Amino acid sequence: MALILSDAMLRTAIEQSFNAVVVTTSQLELPGPQIVYVNQAFCNMTGYTAEELMGKTPRILQGPRTDPETIERLRRCLNAGEYFIGNTVNYRKDGECYYVEWNITPIRDGQGRITHFVSVQRDLTEKKKVENDRNLMANALEANSDQVLMTDREGHIVYVNRAFEDQTGYRREEIIGQTPSLLRSGHHDHAFYDEMWHTLASGQPFRATFVNRAKDGSEFHLEQTVTPVRDDFGEITHYMSTGKDISDRVRMEQTLRRMATIDLLTGLPNRSFGEQLLEREWHRQARYQEGLSLIMADIDHFKSINDEHGHDAGDQVLAQVGKQLQALVRRTDSAIRWGGEEFLILVPRANLEQAIELAERIRLGIRCQHHPGVGRVTMSFGVACYQPDDSRKSLLRRADQTLYAAKEAGRDRVMASPDTD
């Protein structure tokens, strides 16, 4: 059975509606339509009482920020007797502006003539504020110099900012839908990622320095924080990653570390770092008993080179000898600038005979090299092999004493230490 609504029931329904309702006359000529009815929601939205609004034109709600193009579209629709929907800025009684959506319908009589317009309106201010806040956040993310990346719960990328594009070389359209594994450089093992996902699953942010690979294959260091994002029900729906590119800082630290451990002239480990390398090999020998030999080497007549050709020429000889030593030793060996024109070569997993053979190969290689402005140079070598009763100091002393013996014997030769100190 159909429900027949009385005028009173309709009026009550409109009056109690959450949406603002205003009814005007159909007069479009100046001064324009006049308000003949407003509901309480309209009064609440505008700050005016019904008495203050009766007989007024809705134009009293317009102001400087009211969009003239929207008003012009409204005028054309009303003149054509058409339905209109649009939104703009209106002003409350106290002068505060608000965003409003209009839905305006012409009301016709039995002869089809428009007698009134009814407008159902919604206050969009809060919605607009949310949109503005969202846009502000999006603009802030775009302007951020740090990389920002967001994935869904399954790990598929749904957003990256401009800094991400600039630093990785990937455009947004080619990275959306991919997973961050596209950036993996191979520097992190499974345990690293297991720890990350375990931390995120517990609801905690994960912080670490990532070494990632850009689209062009170059690697960069990122000080990165990955944070779970929850919905209103507390469920994790996304993961937000923010990262600061610290590649320059890492390179600087590596440079400083290199300067602290590497002899800048020869490119070889300096004595301080060399002592650490010797300690490492010493402990390895103690554990695995695979053999350890030392070769102490010295450039013959180096003082004469400096005196006759100048210190610049001497430095060039040192630099060239350093390069040759790096090229002539085995991959497992370490050539160290021990001081002045003296070098120490650590030869792990080698007996005395093997170390002598290496020293002889180095001697011949050095002897064949021509140095511009200086000519050929020679080196003397003292070789000592680890013995059970050796200490690091005694092994070094035997190598040094054997080098001294080689120089005393005429230089440009390899001599081996006796088995005991």
Image (cartoon, rainbow, N blue to C red):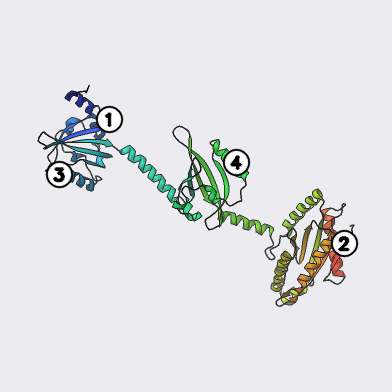
Quadrant where the C terminus lies?
bottom right
Residue 284 is situated, as x and y percent measured from the top left of the image, at 78, 51
Task: Name the foreground residue: 295 vs 359.
Answer: 359
Q: Is residue 288 above or below residue 378?
A: above
Q: Which residue is mark 1?
A: 18
Q: Earlier in the sequence, mark 4 or mark 3?
A: 3
Left or right relative to 354: residue 130: left
Q: Amino acid at mark 1?
A: Phe
Find the distance from the CA under tag 4 to the CA under tag 1.
Answer: 51 Å
Does the rendering let one see residue 12? yes
Find the distance from the CA under tag 1 to the CA under tag 3.
Answer: 29 Å
Question: Tag 1's secondary structure?
Answer: loop
Front position among marks 2 and 1: 1
Residue 19 is situated, as x and y percent measured from the top left of the image, at 26, 32
Task: Name the foreground residue: 104 vs 5.
Answer: 5
Left or right relative to 167: residue 66: left
Disc 4 packing (10 Å; few <14; some 14–19; many ≥20): few
Disc 2 packing (10 Å; few <14; some 14–19; many ≥20): many
Task: Name the foreground residue: 48 vs 208.
Answer: 208
Front position among marks 1 and 3: 3
Q: Which residue is mark 4?
A: 195
Q: Which residue is mark 2?
A: 417
Q: Amino acid at mark 3?
A: Asn
Q: Earlier in the sequence, mark 2 or mark 3?
A: 3
